[in-house]
Amino acid sequence: KDSPKGATMYVTLEPCVHFGKTPPCVDAIIKSGIKRVVVCEKDPNPIVNGKGISQLRERGIKVDMYDTKGVVRSINCGFNKWIVEKKPYAIVKIASTLDGKIADRRGDSKYLTGESIRRAVHKMRYRSDAILIGAQTVIKDDPLLDCRLFIQTSSKKPARVVVDGNLRLNPEYRIFREDGALRIILTSKTAYDRKIRLLKRFESIGVQIVPFKTQDGVILIKDILEYLGSMNILYMLVEGGQRVFTDFIDSKEADLLVMNMSPRVFGAGGIGFYSGDREYKFSQLHYLPYESMIFDRDVLISYYREGSDVYGIDRSYSLD
């Protein structure tokens, strides 16, 4: 076995200095005899921030900071946000027509975009710790939310999270039949207390039902993110539908909007991705464009929420 003595070590995040689930990384590095450490990013955790670098330098180990121009921050953005806010990095993916419609007037939205861009979405799912959708999307599409277009088999299965304030769903939908994946329904305390028999049916197949207090009958996005953050979920992909998209936009809790646009126009009667009655001033700019990509006939444009780039900007949609 080769000895690391005298070697250079490259790390995406500053080595830790505290006891957690494992002993401090800094101690192991010092004992190993490594002479140089290249660090891509300081750990935003106040317990660590800069202390790991200082301790290594105090013990005579050369530490260089590497300017990655945001590449590593895009990898670490979920951790960076969670460690500061204890909430997951929320990516809202919206597949729409050129006129901003997510379904036609009949509610049909399946395969609005082509397979090439859907493969990028499946990669985003694979990167995520959880995928969140609303009850109406389950009723309309009966989705699996798998990653098959990116990877056929994997032991990593993102949690499936469904917002169903009135507990309208039943255990027969495919999303609740995914073996090995954590399945969670977020509902109102009122529905939780009222539908005892349905709760038992869900619990019999391993689906967790979590009750929330509501405000004007709505589960607050802030409360959802805080709950999922308490479960150590760092990355969450939000896939619809209209009500969920609207709540994330109005609450300003979406860190990244990923717009997947099909070259179609549904026109009058189509269902838009935003249904709120809130009026925003023309001067208000909440999301800033980050990058665009072409996938055959479809176009992907990502926008980050103003201020969220302090944690980095996710690029899990890229197939590079």
Image (cartoon, rainbow, N blue to C red):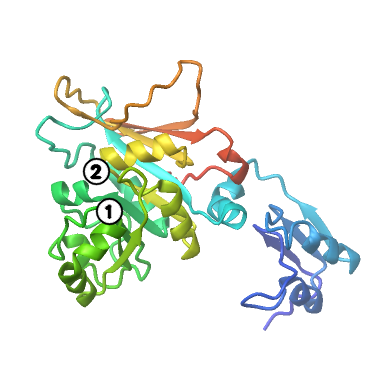
Quadrant where the image shows the N terminus: bottom right
Distance in Å between CA atoms under marks 2 and 1: 8 Å
Residue 27 in the image: state x and y as whole percent. Answer: 78, 75
In the picture of the structure, the residue carrying the numbered disc 2 is 115
Residue 186 on image: x %, y %: 31, 58
Q: Mark 1 sits on what residue?
A: 149
- The residue depicted at 68 percent of the width and 54 percent of the height is 44
| Quadrant housing residue 309 | top right
Residue sitting nearer the eye, 172 or 174: 172
> On the rendered structure, is 5 left or right of 156?
right
* SS class, disc 1: loop
Of the two numbered discs 2 and 1 on the same chain, state the one appearing first in sequence. Answer: 2
The residue positioned 44% from the left and 52% from the top of the image is: 223
Q: In the picture provided, is 18 more to the left or to the right than 77?
A: right
Q: Is residue 269 left or right of residue 134?
A: left
The answer to whether the residue labelled 2 contacts the one labelled 1, judged by CB atoms less than 8 Å apart, is yes
**Residue appearing at x 32%, y 26% in the figure:** 277
Which residue is pictured at 70% across the width and 76% down the height?
A: 19
